[in-house]
Amino acid sequence: MASYNISEWQALMRRAQAGDAAAYRVLLEALRPWLVAYFRRRLMGSDGEDLVQMTLLSLHEKRHTYDPGSPFLPWISAVARHKLIDFVRKSGRHVHVELNEELGLEDGMQPDLAARDVAVLLAQLPKDQARIIKLHKLDGLSVEEVAGQTGKSASAVKVTVHRGLKKLQSLVGIKGGVNE
Amino acid sequence: MSDLIDSLTDGLKPVKPLRSRPLWLGALAGLVVAVFYIWFFYGPRPELTALMGGEWPRSHMPVVKPLMFLALGISALLGASGLVRPEGRPKLRYLLPVLIIGAIVFGALLVEFQHDGWNSTMANLSDGVLICYMTILCGGMAGLVVLWRLWLRRSATSHPVSLGALSGLATASLMAAAYALHCQGDAPVYLLLVYGMAVAILTGIAALLGGKLLRW
């Protein structure tokens, strides 16, 4: 797993906003592998490089929207996610959405940020459906174990999970199949 | 990739971080202009003139109505300022004031229907409907253009439709607050179908515009 000096990025971005080109270069060069990992993890294809470039361009154009008093990672993650969703909407391609609390560790995101994303998404679903998906996808229970805990049949659990994941994908603007 | 980084870093200029202050100063200035316009061109309602002479009106509505729209405008501006950056997310609390005020006015309308009947209630719609619509829509739209020039065009929201809608809700509500200083239509049906509809129309237009203009 690559390691990133995320705490340094905030200071670099502040200096970049003030016009420090050297700090900006260090930041962009440090962000590049992070972005490659971010997109590689979410796209099962070779389009990551284009997205990295698009994200760096957006970062440049919108760098004034970074609040110097706030952490940098949520800001750059939101920019990257925005570019990803935009890309997926335009291309209509299939994207791998993992519902895993480990999501983000590889690209250096704090687990609590990734967990918050998952929690926010699950909150959009009916309670029963969210619970079943949590048990199966996050807690790692088998379909049969989830069926046992929830009092539903195994096939009902499978259908609920499938529909729930489809709905989650549509919530983040992703069309296409579901990875279960 | 290094070419891209070279081109982005070459001749890098300092940028002014986006702040909320221009939003609030612009909104305050716009509200002051709107209040002056209404006060001097339309004239204040008689209860407010009397209030300035120290006489509290029999009904609270001459005072409550402008404050109600002012509260809507401020809450919508708060919502817009929360959505202007990429990491901003829509929250239910941005809509709570609209829902609460809408529910109160709708409840009052039902009571009025029950008490006075359809004909008597709808008779409250006869005065000044067109001027009310036009003032809120035109004034709100002018405010929206100023908001765009001052602030919105520098945004990078992940939710352009919501940001557009909240901006339209804010400018229309502030214009409605100013117009309420003149307008004597206090009946719930008037508030809902004239003020409410004008504000809703501008909110819808701004949401559509936001979906087109705030993408990046």
Image (cartoon, coloured by chain):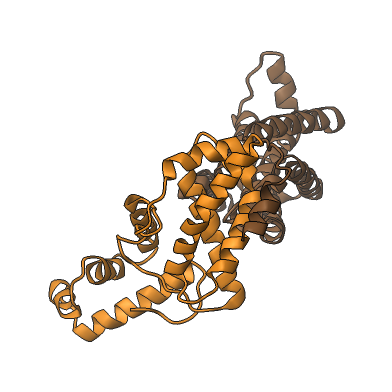
In front of the other: B15 or B48: B15
- Describe residue A10's horizontal placement relative to residue B192 as left or right: left
Is residue B134 shown to the viewer in this render? yes
Could you tell me which quadrant the N terminus of chain A lies in? Answer: bottom left
Name the outermost residue toward the right: B41
| Whole-percent x, y for residue A2 in the image | 38, 57
Q: Which residue is situated farthest in the top direction here?
A: B54
**Residue at point 44% right, 82% down?**
A177
Question: How many numbered tags mark residues here?
Answer: 0
Q: Quadrant of residue B82?
A: top right
Direction from residue B93 to residue B191 in the image, left or right: right
Q: Residue at x 20, y 83 (%)?
A: A154
Does residue A24 lie above or below B158 as drawn? above
Q: Furthest residue to the bottom?
A: A155
What is the x, y in percent for residue A125? 36, 66
Q: Is residue B190 among the parts visible in the rendering?
A: no
Whether residue B160 sits left or right of residue B96 in the image: it is right
| Quarter of the picture holding the C terminus of chain A | bottom left
Q: Which chain is brown?
A: B
Q: Which chain is orange?
A: A
Q: Residue B85: x and y, percent?
A: 57, 47
Res A16 → quadrant = top right
Q: Residue at x 40, y 79 (%)?
A: A178
Picture coordinates of residue A47 (x, y %)?
55, 73
Instruction: In this rendered view, identify the residue nearer to me: B7 or B81.
Output: B7
